[in-house]
Image: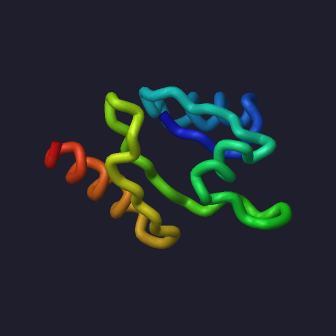
Amino acid sequence: MGISADQVDRQLEFDTRNNLGFPLLSDPDRAIASQFGVKRMGPLPSKRATFVIGTDSRVVAAIRSETNMHAHADEALESLGAR
């Protein structure tokens, strides 16, 4: 699943345009971003991060790279393969 501070209508537009194939959630008040430590102060967007969460609800991996988008998918898949 993906989560961003974008409003629901913007999430739907992004999903429709990109055919992602997974749910997108809206976090406009950035409460979830705050819980995961990726909320920035003021109106700046949240930090880009990917979290792999296991079936036991524990964080298996946290990938934090704002410049290397490939790292998110590559490291998330790698962490799943190690399980």
Viewer-nearest residue: 12 or 65: 65
- The coloring applied to the image is rainbow
In this view, 18 is above or below 79: above
Residue 60: percent from the left, percent from the top? 33, 47
Quadrant (top left/top right/bottom left/bottom right) for the C terminus: top left
Residue 77: percent from the left, percent from the top? 25, 48
Quarter of image, res 70? bottom left
In this view, 81 is above or below 12: below
Quarter of image, res 16? top right
Viewer-nearest residue: 14 or 40: 40
Q: Is residue 22 left or right of residue 3?
A: left
In this view, 22 is above or below 48: above
Which residue sits at x=78%, y=41%? 28
Residue 64: percent from the left, percent from the top? 46, 64
Which residue sits at x=22%, y=44%? 80
Which residue sits at x=55%, y=60%? 48
How many numbered markers are drawn?
0
As drawn, the residue found furthest toward the left would be: 82
As drawn, the residue found furthest toward the right would be: 42
Viewer-nearest residue: 22 or 61: 61
Q: Is residue 4 left or right of residue 44?
A: left
Which residue sits at x=34%, y=30%? 56
As drawn, the residue found furthest toward the bottom would be: 67
Quarter of image, res 31? top right
Residue 25: percent from the left, percent from the top? 62, 32
